[in-house]
Amino acid sequence: MTHNYEEKELYYPDGTVMYRGGVKKNDFGHDIYDGKGTLFDQDGELLFEGEFANHMKQGNGIMYLKGQMIYQGEFIQNKKQGNGILYKDGHIYYEGHFRNDLMDGYGILYYEEDLIAPFLELRAQYPHLDQPQYEGDFVHGMKKGKGKQYYPNGFLQYEGDFIWNHMQGAGKLYYAPETPSAEELASGVSTLQYEGYFFEDTKHGKGKIYSRLGVLEAEGQFKEDAMTGHGTLYYASGQACYIGELLNGEKHGRGDYFNENGKIIYSGEFINGERLRITPEIEREIEKLQQQLDNLVGLPNAKKELHNLINFIKIQSLRVDHGLTSFPITYHLVFSGNPGTGKTTVARIIGQIYKHLGVLSSGHFVETDRAGLVAGYVGQTALKVQEVVNKAKGGVLFIDEAYSLVNDKQDAFGKEAIDSLLKAMEDLRDDLVVIVAGYTELMEEFLLANPGFKSRFNHFVQFDNFSTEELYDIFAMLCKNNDYQYEEAFANHMRDQLHKIPIESIPNFSNGRYIRNLFEKLVTIQSNRLIQQNNITKQELMTFAEDDILLGITENLFDNTF
């Protein structure tokens, strides 16, 4: 490399000046830019003036486009790198740090002149309002990191995190002042509108929202600029108005509604901003479910208890309509009695009624027992209970033979299941109803096994054995529902056999299950008789004959089905 430096002009093939300034010869004897110089395009328009090194822009310089300055600042190897200023239409667009030709590092981005033109007088009167569009961190040419963004009138709009030109992360958003107060003019900051998390310029995540008067209005989860998820709404006094689920800024889902004195006056389901009310349509659905319950054979205790609960909830709803406090109760239930007395059927109906009354969000039914709650290793049971509870959330969790969870005091697995269940009942107390069921004596022992049960289960429903007449009614209902019929002679034999059953002396009599088993056995007997015939009519397919029940009596069907 030679080092013969000189000032000279270099030309395009047509003779137009391409470069004027310092040059030196490279190893091949060619002139290369080195030192201070000026570049021109073929039309003679200025392209660049500044420092060169080894034929590349290096150091300070100014770039031009069609005679207008577009950049002034530092270069390294032909790229904007270091501190510099970008221009747009002759005005400063950006000043700050560059890397590899892009805005990168701390910098200031300015509004275009036409956007701030309406506010020039205000900015002149209050110099501290002469603010840029953005000041803060850049990465690869975009806003990324901490920064502040201003409204065209110079008031602070947002301060916080940015990612790829968007407000994203934690930050504060301020109202656009339309008629700013003297205090706002003096500070250049209007009322805080929102503080929390953002995603692509929208409120997204946990945050708080304020009124123009600076009063906290709501806090909780936001999604796409609207509160969606769990949150709290406030009265102007600062007292919580509502705590619960929201959708697009409105109360929707489970929640608690408070009066201005802080008392809960309603706890339950909300839809599109309004608490669930017992409308005529809902009343009709409740009546249908009540009719289902009333149509069940027997069960006087269950019917009475459920009617009491329905009346209680309806009256509490009327109290809320008048701004009175709704008295909170627990809706968990204890069903005690022998198998087959209708406990599962009633639990399903209760779930649906609770849904329509706003006690539960879905009212679906999940049935389990010890095997569904207890795992084989300590520590896994809690996870198993949580899994079952999550399935039942919003509905009824029916635990059959619940007493089996407390086999003895040394049963660590059962104790873990009970502790986990009690915790889940507390965590989901507003949207989960647990019904425990089992034999009367064993359920009494179960409730005494843990003090936590006393406060959570205070509604007890005794399911007594069905009387012989009720058992006959259940059989008649099974026949009707399954398209079977019988003559009076068959009916008389059925009643006689049922009356001979010593219901009260049979341990753990299976009640409705006994009748269902009896019905299935008689269907089998009828099937065996009919299959011997060459032609079978529809009437014969539907009819139990007297011979069917007589054969059943001969085979001790009524004694062997308990």
Image: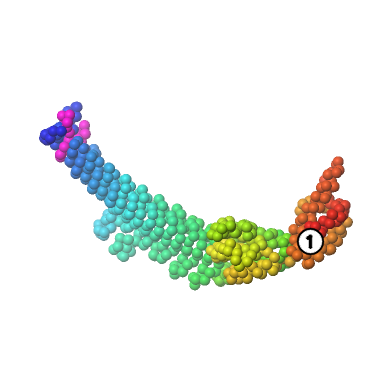
| Left or right of 528 on screen, residue 31 | left
Badge 1 crowding class, 10 Å Cα cut-off, few under 14, some 14 to 19, many 20 or more, is many
Viewer-proximal residue among 298 and 504 = 504
| Residue 317 percent location from the top left of the image | 59, 67
Determine whether the residue tagged by mark 1 lies in a helix, strand or loop: helix
Magenta stretch, residue numbers = 26-46
- Is 193 one of the magenta-colored residues? no
Judge left or right: residue 335 versus residue 7.
right
Q: Mark 1 points at which residue?
A: 471
Q: Position of residue 449 (x, y in %)?
A: 61, 69
Query: Would you say residue 53 is visible in this rendering?
Result: yes
Which quadrant, please, contains the N terminus?
A: top left
- Amino acid type at circle 1 is Leu
Image point (32%, 58%), residue name: 155
Image position of 59 with respect to 454: above or below:
above
x 86%, y 41%: residue: 534
Q: In which quarter of the image is the C terminus?
A: bottom right
Residue 269: image location, x then y, percent? 56, 61
Task: Answer whether residue 303 is visible to the viewer in this image.
Answer: no
